[in-house]
């Protein structure tokens, strides 16, 4: 039984799941918006919000912690120099999930995971 167990397994082992979260979060930070399944969006959202909070802290230790999770200098630099300053005054809730409907091929429920200040026209 999985009573009181938080988080979804998404059909992956632990290392694959961590890599998935890191890759999806990196894409979210880079592009401001990603299209994925609802289950993945709901699983990645708290992970991404914690990393944006690290970016808001901005100190060396926070940068090293983000680097350990994301494993990409470019993404960490974007997080700390562009994304985190935009949320400096916001106490949380940096992302939103917008449901899109079923995917054409397998009818999986799809969603957009985006930063709340994302401007699609820019």
Image (cartoon, grey):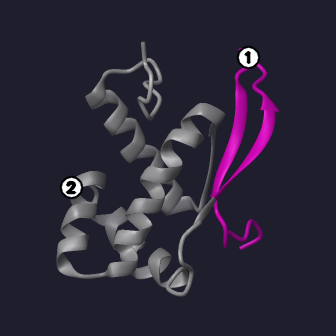
Residue at image mark 2: 68
Q: Is residue 55 left or right of residue 121?
A: left
> Where in the figure is residue 16, as x and y percent of width and height?
32, 28
Determine the secondary structure under disc 2: helix
* Comparing labels 2 and 1, the label whose residue is closer to the camera: 2
State which tag comes first along the sequence, 2 or 1.
Answer: 2
**Image quadrant where residue 4 sits:** top left
Marks 1 and 2: in contact by CB < 8 Å? no
Quadrant for the C terminus, please.
bottom right
Query: Which one is in front, 122 or 15?
Result: 15
Marks 2 and 1 sit apart, C-alpha to C-alpha, by 35 Å
Image quadrant of residue 70? bottom left
Q: Is residue 119 magenta?
A: yes
The residue drawn where x is 78% and y is 21% is 104
Q: Secondary structure at mark 1?
A: loop
Q: Is residue 37 above or below residue 92?
A: above
Which residue sits at x=59%, y=32%? 39
Residue reaching furthest to the right: 101
Identify the residue at horizontal 42%, vertical 12% (top origin): 1
Q: Which residues are magenta?
A: 96-122
| Residue underneath mark 1 | 105
In the image: residue 119, left or right of residue 87:
right
């Amino acid at each position: 039984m999985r009573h009181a167990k938080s988080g979804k397994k998404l059909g992956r082992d632990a290392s694959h799941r961590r890599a998935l979260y890191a890759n999806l979060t990196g894409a979210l930070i880079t592009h401001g918006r990603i299209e994925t399944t609802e289950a993945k969006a709901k699983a990645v959202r708290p992970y991404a919000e914690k990393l944006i909070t690290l970016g808001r802290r901005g100190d060396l230790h926070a940068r090293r912690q983000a680097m350990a999770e994301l494993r990409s200098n470019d993404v960490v630099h974007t997080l700390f120099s562009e994304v985190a300053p935009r949320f400096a005054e916001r106490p949380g809730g940096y992302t939103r999930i917008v449901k899109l409907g079923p995917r054409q091929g397998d009818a999986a429920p799809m969603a957009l995971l985006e930063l709340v200040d994302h401007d699609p026209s820019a």
